Structures are given as structure tokens and as C-alpha cells.
Amino acid sequence: MVVVGTQWGDEGKGKVVDWLTEHAQGVARFQGGHNAGHTLVIRGVKTALQLIPSGIMRDGVKCYIGNGVVVDPAHLVSEIARLEKAGLDVRSRLFISESCPLILPFHVEVDKAREALRENSGAGKIGTTGKGIGPAYEDKVARRALRVQDLKHPDRFAKKLRDLLALHNEALGGYLKASTLEFEPIFEQAMKLAEELKPMMADVGYMIHKSQAAGDNLLFEGAQGTLLDVDHGTYPFVTSSNCVAGNAAAGSGVGPHLLHYILGITKAYTTRVGSGPFPTELPIDDEGTIGYHLSTVGQERGTVTGRARRCGWLDAAALKRAIIINGVTGLCITKLDVLDGLSEIKVCVGYTLRGEPIDILPLDADDIQFCEPQYETFPGWTQSTFGVTTWDGLPENARAYLKRVEEIIGAPIDMVSTGPDRDHTILLRHPFRG
């Protein structure tokens, strides 16, 4: 099954994947890089993952980093060390596709310099994490990337690195007006990291194929969210990869026939980090406002950047677009408990765009900026939903809210998350059991 975000990321995918891994033998990441951040809370202990699949928190579960992921080797080794320090067995269970493109120091410098140039020129920042993700994907598409497999061949790595560094130094020292980098420190660090990573390099696609043939349950874990997809999101305010369910096959090296169930994750409201249009956005700075409530009660800060997330009402018209793109089988609604105590709750069911009604998020980000949300309003509830584990345990108004959301978006809600811990979950239909 595939787990994907259906908003602008930060929907709580990590917690859901962690919960589902009780019934899985393998978890694969298929896109993005360490710009993703999955926060898991297990028995009250919080763990933040960025590159390593969330299945690492379950003993015995194999974790795969697929070819669609861009890998910063320095960050990966650091993340492994942090998890091992916490007592987790990582190296015997983590497998890295040899085809993953590498993120190297010059990618990070180019990423940061471009954002600074856009800001200084008045063009407006994209809102990247500055981790080098975009430039690394550019090198992949331009067929000049260094890949994980190159780390096994020092001479080959050195030749490719010299050529690639020269290209990026030309941009850094010229158009971007930033400092250039030296060859030797990058090469020496890469060769040192290579020795740690070699035992984990693998033919990930073939491993997944054999695991599935043996009858294993497998999870494909997406990063970011559908509306940040480079093709289908609010372009250009998007990430640099395909976040949608269909890319689980291409990004891990298996056929699409293995994607039996698509679980879409969405918050009971909406957030996004970084720039770009956001029709249902509410101000978050004024104490006592709805936006302030969502931001503070929901603890809405980016796992990777620490930036405050923008907050707003649930946008069902945007969610409808994501459900179509991904072919969502069922939804998991997360952070329902954040809505506790609100006197009324709104859901965007469509927009007015230049005087015309529409019922789905437009494809053009410029059009989205002019979308005026049209809301349905629901009575709130005063009872706490935090930690509730049964449907009947929810307040009547909460159940009514969720049932109406189902009707608007045309997809069933199969799970509801009522808190950050893996046990704070209501199961309506098990994705692995139908």
C-alpha cells in the first residue's frame, strides 16, 4: 500500500506509517530527501525522522530508500548515528538504492544562494528548506548526477565530481555572487562516508519484488504532499519531485501492479509551510483567533525547518483534486483533536473565481490566488477527542463533521488520528485487511 499526503505536507504521515508497520514487513521511501520531516511519538517519546523510513521504529521491519530519493550522505550517516544512540538497530535493516542521486555541499550552497537572490531581487522566495534538494534533482534530470553507486568507485567519483563542481562553481561565483567550493574537502568527506554506506547499498527494486513475492506486506511512504508535487501542485511553489502515489512505483523500482491500496493522509484542517497560494488561510498571530488556536494547539511548526506553519480551515475542494490525482482508496484524518473546543467549524466546499463558481482547486497557481473560498459551517464540540480509539467514542458533532467531509470529497474515511501517539487511532477499515 502507498501512504501519501493529500495537502501541502505535514499531514502526519509518519505516525500513520508507524502504526501500520505493525502489519508490514517492509517500508520504502520513494521520493524527496531530508527536506521531509516525520515526527513520531511512541509511548510519549518523540522522534524526528527526515530521510530514513518511519518503519525503522519497529523491530524487524526492513526499510528501503528507493531510487527516487535524493540522498545527502553526510546527513544520512548522522541520522543513522542518532537513531543508534537511541538504541535502534538501523544498519542491518536499512537498504539504500545504488541509483539514488547524491546531494553534495555545492547543491546546498546553490539552493541557498538562489533563494537569497530571489529575495534580494524582489521576485519572492520559493520557500525551500535550503537542503540542496532542487539542485540535486536538476542534476539528475540533466543526466550529470553523482549517484550512490559512484561512491564505490573512487576514480570514477573523482572525475564526475570535478566536472560537476566546475559547473556549479561557475554559477556560484558568477550569477549567484556566492563563494565557490574546493574539490578536495568534498571528495575526502565523500570517500569517508562511502565506507559507512557501502554495506547498506542494495538493488532495492529487486529486494522489494522478492519480498512481495514471498507474501510480505509492504508500505510505500511518501514525503511532502500532493499539492507540493512538481507536476500537480501549486507550481512554482512546490518541491522538486513527484509526491503522488503513482511515483511509488517509479521511485522504488517496482511495477504499478503492486500498488493495491492508496491511503491519503489529511489533517482535519489545512496547513502549509513556505510561500504560495493558500485559499483558506487564517491569520495565526492574534491570540483568540481561529488561526492562532490551530497553530498553537496543533503545535504547527516544521519538523525540518522549525518555521511556523500557515493554518486554515479544511479545503475539501483542494482535497478532491488530491484524491483524483492519487486514486485514493481511503483517507486517514489526522489531528481531529485540534478542533476540540471550537464553537463552529468550517469546510471549504468550492470557490468563486472571478465571479464563477468552481468545485475543485484550479491547476494554475495564479488562479488559486484569486479563489474566494465558499464554506459550509458545522457546530463544534466541547468534549475532548484526544486519544479516543473508537468511532462511537467521538462526540456526535465530530462524527457528523467527518461524515459530511466524506460526502463532499467522495472518498471513505478509513482511519482517524486523535493524538500523536501510535495508539491514538480509530480504525474503521484496515488498509491491509480490506
Image (cartoon, helix red, strand yellow):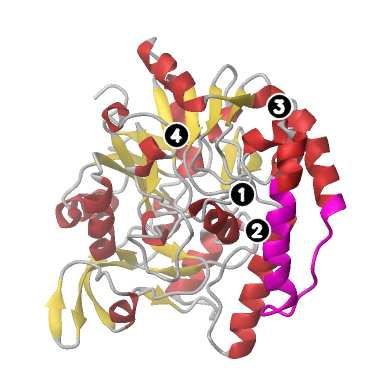
Tag 1: amino acid = His
The residue at the point 29 percent across, 74 percent down is: 364
Callout 4–callout 3 Cβ contact below 8 Å: no
Nearer-the-camera pick, 60 or 66? 66
CA–CA distance in space, label 1 to label 4: 17 Å
* Residue receiving disc 1: 34
Across and down, in percent, residue 337 comes to 43, 52
Mark 1 closeness class: few <14, some 14–19, many ≥20 residues within 10 Å: many
Across and down, in percent, residue 401 comes to 24, 55
Across and down, in percent, residue 329 comes to 23, 39
The residue at the point 68 percent across, 78 percent down is: 176
* Residue receiving disc 4: 252
Query: Is residue 341 at all visible to an observer of this figure?
Result: no
Tag 3: amino acid = Lys
Mark 4 closeness class: few <14, some 14–19, many ≥20 residues within 10 Å: many
Residue stretch rendered in magenta on the structure: 160-184
Tag 4: amino acid = Ser
* Residue receiving disc 2: 131
CA–CA distance in space, label 3 to label 2: 23 Å
Q: Vertical placement of 403 versus 250: above or below?
A: below
Nearer-the-camera pick, 218 or 295? 218
Q: Vertical placement of 242 versus 86: above or below?
A: below
Of the residues under marks 3 and 2, which one precedes in the sequence? 2
* Residue receiving disc 3: 198
CA–CA distance in space, label 2 to label 1: 7 Å
Callout 2–callout 1 Cβ contact below 8 Å: yes
Q: What element carries label 1?
A: loop
CA–CA distance in space, label 4 to label 3: 19 Å
Q: Vertical placement of 143 versus 358: above or below?
A: above
Magenta region includes residue 179: yes
